Image (spheres, helix red, strand yellow):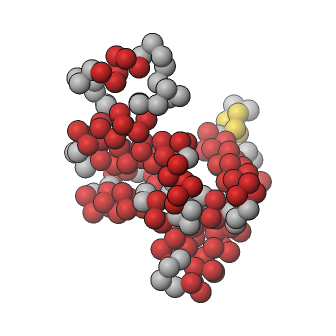
């Protein structure tokens, strides 16, 4: 969580204050890399906690992407992990209108250092779409929420079972709830 907080500070200051951004980037990298070794220490009924599994998988994904793209770890992070954590802990439901709008702003690709790569990645695009739809739903923008889910997630064969696709995509009464 500390690493993710520094990541958001880095993204906030990347263009306006490069010196502060450099410090935030170093701290974000340091704390994010500390996550996986600490994960898995606590167990419930001999099972790893879901949050620990999530952290390890995410950091591994980011590390592999950083190696592939030959960029720093922090720059290989796409969708805002801060908003993902809010979603994971059901915090979006507890936000007011101002916080929800700020959350939408945190999901903009322009905040990342590789917007063109992330906006083309189907995984990242799906994560952002789901998070935006959740925020819009909590802003009582149900139609807009449903529309972006149908356009950006349900329209892809990879995400819709073949037996369900014609029904879901052509039925105007399908609920997004």
Q: Is residue 13 above or below residue 132?
A: below
User: Height in image: 163 above or below 47?
Assistant: above
In the image, what residue occupies the spot 27% across and 20% down?
171
Q: Quadrant of residue 154?
A: top left
In the displayed structure, would residue 76 be above or below residue 92? below
| Residue toward you, 137 or 164 | 164
Could you tell me which residue is drawn at 68 percent across and 45 percent down?
A: 57
Residue 149: % across, % down = 36, 37
Outermost residue, top side: 163
Dividing the image into 4 quarters, which one contains the N terminus?
bottom right
Note whether residue 63 is visible. no
Front-most of 100 and 125?
A: 125
Question: Is 10 left, or right, of 71 in this rendering?
Answer: left
Instruction: Count the labels in the image.
Output: 0
Q: Quadrant of the C terminus?
A: top left
Q: Residue at x 57, y 84 (%)?
A: 18
Image location (x, y in percent) of residue 169: 34, 24
Residue located 64% across and 69% down the image: 28
User: Left or right: 73 with respect to 24?
Assistant: right
The quadrant holding residue 104 is bottom left
Q: Position of residue 76 (x, y in %)?
A: 64, 59
Q: Could you tell me if residue 75 is visible in this image?
A: yes
Indicate the position of residue 12 as horizontal and vertical percent values.
Answer: 48, 74
């Amino acid at each position: 969580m500390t690493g993710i907080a520094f990541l958001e500070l880095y993204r906030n200051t990347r263009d306006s204050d490069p010196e502060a951004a450099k410090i935030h980037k170093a701290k974000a990298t340091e704390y994010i890399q500390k996550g996986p070794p600490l994960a898995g220490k606590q167990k419930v009924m001999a099972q790893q906690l879901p949050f620990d599994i999530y952290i390890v998988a995410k950091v591994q994904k980011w590390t592999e992407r950083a190696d592939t793209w030959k960029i720093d770890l922090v720059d290989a992070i796409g969708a805002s992990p801060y908003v993902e954590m809010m979603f994971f802990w059901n915090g979006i439901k507890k936000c007011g209108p101002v916080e929800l709008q700020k959350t939408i702003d945190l999901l903009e690709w322009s905040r990342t250092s590789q917007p063109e790569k992330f906006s083309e990645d189907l995984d990242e695009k799906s994560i952002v779409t789901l998070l935006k739809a959740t925020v819009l739903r909590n802003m009582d923008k149900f139609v807009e929420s449903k529309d972006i889910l149908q356009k950006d997630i349900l329209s892809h064969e990879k995400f819709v079972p073949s037996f369900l696709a014609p029904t879901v995509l052509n039925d105007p009464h399908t609920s997004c709830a």
